[in-house]
Amino acid sequence: MIELHHLKQSRSRRITWLLEELGQEYTVISYDRHPQTNLAPPELKTIHPLGKAPVLRDKGVVLIESAAIIEYLIAEYGQGNFIPARGTADYYRYLQLMHYAEGSAMLPLLLNLYVGRLGEAGAPLHPRIQSEIANHLGYLNNELEGRDYFVGNSLTGADVQLSFVAQIGIRNAGREAFPHLTRFVDMLQARPAYQRAVAKSGE
C-alpha cells in the first residue's frame, strides 16, 4: 500500500488530496513539529536523509519533493487523467506551473515567514518581500481570470501543486485582494476528495 509520511501544518496536504482524487488506498504516518523550533522531528530522517515531508513510499520507491510525488502518482495511477497530452501547449503550460510553484512562487512566502520572526531586525526587507508576494499572487490571480483551473478545463497536477501557494497567499493577503485566487481556493476545498483528505489526516 502507498505510504505517505506527513508533517502536520505542511505542504503534505497536496499529496493526501491527490491520493483521494485518484481513489487510491494509502496509509498516512503523521509527525508533529517540535513545539519550540517548529521543525520536523528527527524520526523523518529514518525515511529520507533530509528529514523533510512529504515523503512517499510505494512499490520500493521513496520520493521527496511534492512535484515529483505528484508526477509519480499521476503516471502510476492517473489512467491518463490529471495531466495534458504531452507535446501540446497545455502540457508545456502544465510543466511550467509545476516548477513555478516551488521554484518561484513559494520563495517570497517563505521569506515572509522567516523574516517575520526577526522582528525589527527584518523590517528593512519587508517592503521587497511584500512586493514580490503581490507580484506572484497577482500573476496567479490573473491566470485564473475567466477559468476555473490553471490548465485546460479540468483538475490537473498543476492545480494540486499550486494549491498550497494559493491557500497561504489568500490567508496572508485576505480574501478580497485576489478574487480569482480566492475562488480557486474555495472550489478546491469544496471538492469531496479534498474534504476526505482533511477528514482522514487533519487540516
Image (cartoon, rainbow, N blue to C red):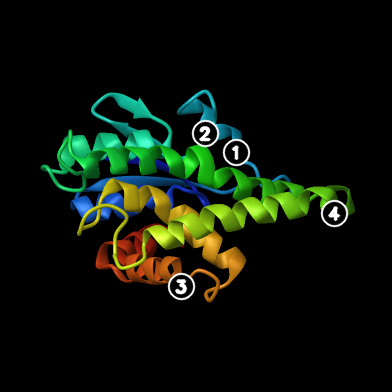
* CA gap, disc 2 and disc 1: 6 Å
Which part of the image, by quadrant, shows the N terminus? top left
| Three-letter code for the amino acid on which mark 3 is drawn | Pro
Foreground tag (3 vs 4): 3
Tell me if residue 20 comes above or below residue 50 in the rendering: below
| Residue type, label 2 | Leu
> Residue shown at 52%/46% (left/top)?
105
- Farthest bottom residue? 176
The numbered mark, 4 or 1, whose residue comes first in the sequence reads 1
Residue ID for mark 3: 179
In this rendered view, identify the residue nearer to me: 124 or 143: 143
Horizontal arrangement in the rendering, residue 133 relative to residue 80 (left or right): right
Mark 1 lies on a secondary structure that is loop
Examine the rendering and report whether any part of residue 69 can be seen.
Answer: yes
Q: Position of residue 97 (x, y in %)?
A: 38, 44
Which amino acid, by three-letter code, is at mark 4? Gly
Q: What element carries label 4?
A: helix
Contact, mark 2 vs mark 1 (Cβ under 8 Å) = yes
Q: Which of 153 and 118 is in front in this view?
A: 153
Q: How far apart are marks 2 and 4 (CA)?
A: 30 Å
Q: Nearer the viewer, residue 106 or 26?
A: 106
Amino acid found under the numbered disc labelled 1:
Pro
Tell whether 197 sits left or right of 134: left
Q: Residues within 10 Å of mark 1 (few under 14, many from 20)?
A: some
Most extreme residue toward the right is 120
Mark 3 vs 1, N-terminal side: 1
Question: Which mark identifies residue 119?
Answer: 4
Quickly name the residue at label 1: 41
